[in-house]
Amino acid sequence: MNRPKIAVHKFSSCDGCQLALLNLGETLLELPKLVDIVHFAEAGPMDETAHVDVALVEGSINTEHDLARIRRIRDNSDYLISIGACATSGGLQALRNMADARAWEAAIYARPEYLDSLDTATPISAHVRVDLALWGCPVNSSQVLAALRDRLFGVAPREERRPLCMECKRLGRVCTLVTRQTACMGPVTRAGCGALCPRMGRDCYACYGPAEQVNGESLGRRFEGFGLLPVDVARRFQFINSAAPAFREAGERFGDGQ
Amino acid sequence: MSGHRDIRIEVPVLARVEGEGALELDIEQGRISRLQLRIFEPPRFFEKFVEGHPPDEVIDMVARICGICPVAYQMTAVQAFERLFAVDPGPWVRAMRRVMYCGEWLQSHALHIHLLAAPDFLGFNNVLEMAEHYPDEVRRGLGLQTLGNDLIALFGARSVHPVGVRVGGFHHAPSTAEVDAIRGRLDAALPQAEALIGWCASLDLLDDRQAFVSVALRHPDEYAIYAGRLVSDQGLDIDSSEWDDRFREIHRPHSTALHAELDGGPYLVGPLARLNLNRERLPSATARALAATGIGFPSDNMFHSMLARAVELHMVLLTRIFHK
């Protein structure tokens, strides 16, 4: 059997989305029956410039070196999937995009001139075409395996766009926003995690990125009704996925009200 | 090795390590003239962007420093805030945070031994190749890794970037049924961990002795994981608030990761250093399993760090989960 070739590439990230594969347990041993893993540095296989059927890309673009690498990876890949918040929206480190990046370098590093660092942390899609984006900080194993399966069977992936509230209700969880007045981001956040935070009795903090039809103004006003200052509301949107357009704009609406 | 050879080794991307690193090694006339571990992982500026966020947001943010060890960062942040606020969350919270931390050691050690390190010692490129020749050992390792992930999720809902820790305690306590189920699995895994200690000790390792300073936490009553004083085998014994008096971070041209020195010199942290300093705190069952290998600690052989991981993995399985 001619198994499709896949590669796993890492850019600036915490490595957590690669664990969607490395944490599979015994299922990990089944993976080579489906696909031929030709590049996955953390797992061992090393052939970064091989032509592959599917490339899974983790992490955001932060350096000049990253720019050259991601273009080469795109040229060598038939189908490119961004996995996780960093690759899909820039991730938590995109908070620097709203700050003076050079001042931050000087504040932390004794010798900023040693660094190869762009002023921004940007998603993969800002530089090359992305065929499928998987949201989540981190993505979970089901999302990654479903994407690979869909590709192997030649069916169009079914992207989850509904808000987390749908998933939370289906699971029969008590709404933390209504019953405890938490600043829960469920109404504007993409489903897919399993409503983990509401299940723990706490507010969703939007690590799965924006759902379809984000009404940030309405939710933000509700949070203000709970006593949050506009700056607190802005921070709710500008957090793990601060550079996702729907969240950035909602955050700016409240952040600018200072 | 010949005393007359010039060797240059450049590894642009190291395989089977966490994060991104490169190795550059020059040997001239049989002597190392340059040796650099280049961490080119670009800066992400956590030090700055956590500023201005409330404590519970910071606890969610710092998890993202590392997907394999998010619990370590969360536990450090929550303790820093509780110290600032002079809040003591009480003995149950302290004990259960240590249990959650045990889950991280369990999954991380199992991952390190089987997916990262062991293939090198046995001559394979990766764990998938190794599994064809050592199927039982690899399955045992992956099972222990899964158990560790499930132990983190018991308190944090997921193992990567868990969502359970907050200032003052946890967002949610696990149910009796969940606790009972995982308790049984921890007990059932003990014989596997004992076999793992024997297996790691049986690997054909170099006898490579080096002089180094071990640094770790030490706790009066337990094997230090969650809390303790900072100690070394050279007499260091300080509170974490005195860190800046003795430790210094330095920025080198070849690496984004800052280097650190204790009293102006290098030092070792991690499982080997911890076991060197805390071996008297091992539970008796773990101490017996280690004694059966015939390998004594403290050890100055860096290759014993994999065995030290197996020993700590056994020790964390003995952790006790209880109800408030």
Image: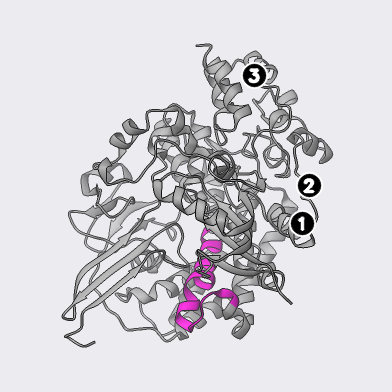
For marks 1 and 2 on the same chain, the one whose residue lies earlier in the sequence = 1
> Residues at badges 1 and 2 in contact (C-beta under 8 Å)?
yes
Measured as percent of width and height from the top left, residue B102 is found at: 53, 58
Q: Name the residue under label 2.
A: A158
Residue at the image point whose x is 73% and y is 31% from the top: A212
Secondary structure beneath dot 2 equals: loop
Residue B256 placement, left or right of B96: left
Q: Do discs 3 and 2 share a chain?
A: yes
Task: Report which quarter residue B133 is drawn in.
Answer: bottom right
| Nearer the observer, A20 or A81 | A81
Q: Which scheme is used to colour this image of the protein? A: one colour
Image coordinates for residue A91, horizontal then vertical, percent: 53, 40
**SS assignment for the magenta stretch, majority:** helix
Give the CA separation, mark 3 to mark 2.
Answer: 29 Å
Give the mark, 3 or 1, whose residue is nearer the N terminus: 1
Position above or below: A94 against B182: above
Precedes in sequence: disc 3 or disc 2: 2
Residue to which mark 3 is pinned = A220
Q: Which stretch did the figure color magenta?
A: B103-128
Q: On the rendered image, what quadrant is the N terminus of chain A found in?
A: bottom right
Q: Which kind of residue does numbered mark 1 sit on? A: Asp
Going by the numbered disc 3, the residue's amino acid type is: Gly
How far apart are labels 1 and 2 at the CA level? 9 Å
Q: Which secondary structure lies at badge 1?
A: helix
Residue A251 left/right relative to A180: left
